[in-house]
Amino acid sequence: MKKLSSPFLAAFAALFLAVPASAADDAPEVSAHAAIVMHADTLEVLYEKNADEHMLIASTTKLMTALVALEECRPDDMVDITPEMCGIEGSSMYLHAGEKYSVEELLCGLLLVSGNDAATALALHTAGSIEKFARLMNEKAQELGMTGTHYENPHGLDAPEHYSTARDLALLMAECMDEPVIAEIGASSQRTVGEKLLMNHNRLINEYPGCTGGKTGYTMAAGRCLVTCAEREETRFICVTLSDPDDWADHAALYDWAFGNYVYAPVIDPEMEIRLPVAGEEPAVLYPASEARVLLEKGGAAEPETHIELPPFIFGPVRSGEELGRVSVTLNGEEIASRPLVSAAGAGNFPLLEQIKHIERFIGLAGPYYLRAE
């Protein structure tokens, strides 16, 4: 096995270090009863406070409503508004019986102005009843690993068995941000639906640089609830606060801390070129199969190391895309990323006897030669 520190990684060495468990010691104090900051791509948790406590979640429920509705319906499906979909208590997009809206238009009313009527309309259209829709919500929660969550309704009005946790809501938000329709609506400052102008209740869309989506929630029992996502360059974080009287400021402070201390950095460059000797032929040119990124902490002194695992040489022919080795990256002795090394293009096929004549070129190389099964 060859070992090296590539220039690609050396550029990060003076700046970044694997995320330590103690990193949250410098996180800001927040007013929330429960909170979490999670990296949206790796789901690594940077900060948590009472993150597994069962809490009322108010209208942050509607993230799951949107996800289930889009799994069961097409965005352009039309919904006939019936009397039981109208006049639901709390926030509303003001539906009226006899109107028609597309699923996507109802999602705008659901996610931007937190319409309880929009939630009810989507649930009844999708499943035929609130109870059946809640079962779909709970099935999706289990699928996502939301072990501390149970839903009774699609809107989040207080109910005895309707609860979640900060950790589960962060997992849900990560899934929602990978759903294009939800992500696009959540990033909008406003949308026009018919003659209705729907303004996004999530103030951070306009007030915090990089905020890409979220969902607000409030009932007197639940207090202020907020789930958001923010991105700078290619680093995305999710923040959840529950029962938080100062949620806007707390999210901004937690994001400032997260972006100031962490980055989602590339540690394997897909353009890294490795040459592998081929008996009797030109060396095979290998590249990592894909880029690898990891969440790193800024300000560390440990240096990442690249490890290249290859045979000393091989016999041809070499097929394009053939896996011939492995590149891995370690930090503080632990592997943090790896990718197979694959050939960029095929190489010729010298006769075996002709290849054997060239073996003396490789005398002194460590380890046995590598003969692949055809």
Image: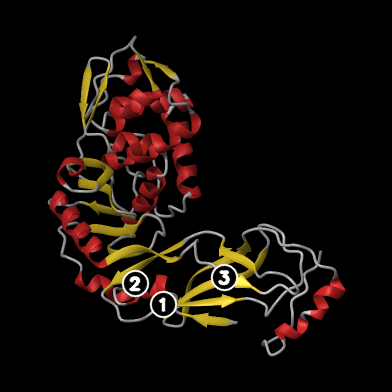
Please name the residue that numbered disc 3 is placed on.
Answer: 274
On the image, the x and y values in percent for residue 248 come to 15, 49
On the image, the x and y values in percent for residue 103 come to 40, 24
| Circle 2 residues within 10 Å: few <14, some 14–19, many ≥20 | many
Please name the residue that numbered disc 1 is placed on.
Answer: 304
Q: Quadrant of residue 78?
A: top left
Q: Amino acid at mark 2?
A: Phe
Q: Secondary structure at mark 2?
A: helix
On the image, the x and y values in percent for residue 92 come to 23, 26
Cα separation, mark 1 vs mark 2, equals 8 Å
Which of discs 3 and 1 lies nearer the camera? The answer is: 3
Task: Tell me which residue sits at (32%, 26%) in the image.
Answer: 118
Are circles 2 and 3 on residues that touch, CB within 8 Å? no
Are circles 1 and 2 on residues that touch, CB within 8 Å? yes
Q: Which residue is most to the right?
A: 353
Please name the residue that numbered disc 2 is placed on.
Answer: 12
Cα separation, mark 3 vs mark 1, equals 18 Å
Task: Tell me which residue sits at (72%, 59%) in the image.
Answer: 319
288 shown above or below 174: below
Which of discs 2 and 3 lies nearer the camera? The answer is: 3
Q: Earlier in the sequence, mark 2 or mark 3?
A: 2
